[in-house]
Image: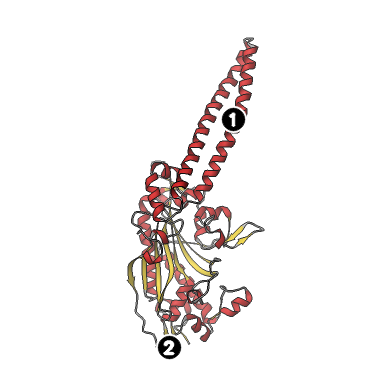
Amino acid sequence: MLTIKQITENTEAVLRGLEKKHFKHAKETIEEVISLNDKRRSTQNQLDKNLAEVNSLSRTIGGLMKEGKKEEAEAARTRVAELKEVNKGLDATMTQAAADMQELLYTIPNVPYEDVPEGTGADDNVVEKTGGMQHELPKDALPHWELAKKYDLIDFDLGVKVTGAGFPVYKGKGARLQRALINFFLDEARESGYTEIMPPTVVNSASGYGTGQLPDKEGQMYHCEADDLYLIPTAEVPVTNIYRDVILEEKQLPVKNCAYTQCFRREAGSYGKDVRGLNRLHEFSKVELVCIDKPEHSRESHKEMLDHVEGLLQKLELPYRILRLCGGDMSFTAALCFDFEVYSEAQKRWLEVSSVSNFDTYQANRLKCRYRSAEKKTELCHTLNGSALALPRIVAALLENNQTPEGIRIPKALVPYCGFDMID
């Protein structure tokens, strides 16, 4: 959530940033926020003046009575009663203005950094880097959903029977491959200095608001209405919310956490080759990185996270590219975001496997996540997160890019985790 200070002191810069994100009605929304803030402040000022007068009059009433000035004391009492009645209205007005402003602030996306490119969608993203091994596949190369059936790795039909579309059942070496990737990603994160967390996979609405999934993505989240709890779309939500309403000491920063969880998203409702098989699911496994940092160091932490994810793809021997997202393709909450995609030789398309984002103070302001500097000044933290990695499309790319006439080859880095070097 943008701070009032950002909006009031840098209004034009905020508007330019919101225009880059293609936020509709930006000017009208920002003007309304400023108007509500002015109303809240002016009402608060009047309320403070009235309270000061009430306190002053209350202190004099006893003295007036002792001096026998009953009429003046009675007049003071009447004035106090009038002011208290007025104050009730002022307090209600101030509370409503603050609530209306808060609700409006929740609807405004984060402002992108200056180095975020202009653009309206995926076609305008900038390719920063490509890498990885080139794979020569047989002429009759199969997509992963056919390989999964051929080698009895994943049963999509059984998932439909048990739950519905978008909930696959992993079997045999397919299940072992999933578990191997999870352990590999967690071990790599630990070696990079991340502390592992095992969080809940359901959260309350306060957590959803804290990281910006609510109200922006409410329709994409599974909601347990009876308990007013949400299934998490990513471990970012519970892990980042660990630091909600927390003041960290500067020496504790950066805080680096990682977590494996199941993730749940309702977004897989479309049809066609782009969502076949593992390309888009309602439930999937993911290892997430979360970092809490001070503002002047968050860019460096972001770079470290990008290097970590790139290192994973290199060890998995997958062809990849890194995209700097344009304003129109960034998430609601991000100030700067890079996507990692792996290339599927069998499908002849790029598959997104990670987004690594810097949120600046946007989430921290919602969370009231702060740190105390060496000078004892309390400031908002910066929050960052990235997938390291999301498993479905990684599994799809591994199966497709490593198929041979003899079977599916397992990358060397994964063999100790799988316990086999070939799926045949």
Residue 111: where, in percent of width, then height?
41, 52
**Residue 43 drawn above or below residue 396:** above
Residue holding disc 2:
140
Give the alpha-carbon distance from disc 1 to disc 2, as whole Å.
79 Å
* 10 Å crowding of disc 1: few (<14), some (14-19), many (20+): some
Q: Nearer the viewer, residue 264 or 122?
A: 122
Q: Earlier in the sequence, mark 1 or mark 2?
A: 1
Residue 195: where, in percent of width, then height?
46, 61
Give the residue drawn at x 45%, y 74%. Answer: 394
The residue furthest right is 226
Give the residue drawn at x 60%, y 14%. Answer: 63
Residue 127 location, quadrant: bottom left
Residue 114: where, in percent of width, then height?
34, 54
Residue holding disc 1:
87
**Secondary-structure class at tag 2:** loop
Q: Amino acid at mark 2?
A: Asp
Residue 367 visible in the current orientation:
no
Q: Nearer the viewer, residue 82 or 270?
A: 270
Give the residue drawn at x 46%, y 41%. Answer: 34
Colour scheme of the picture: secondary structure
Q: Amino acid at mark 1?
A: Asn
Residue 261: where, in percent of width, then height?
53, 66
Q: Nearer the viewer, residue 93 or 153?
A: 93
**Residue 202 drawn above or below residue 315:** above
* 10 Å crowding of disc 2: few (<14), some (14-19), many (20+): few
**Residue 243 drawn above or below residue 282:** above
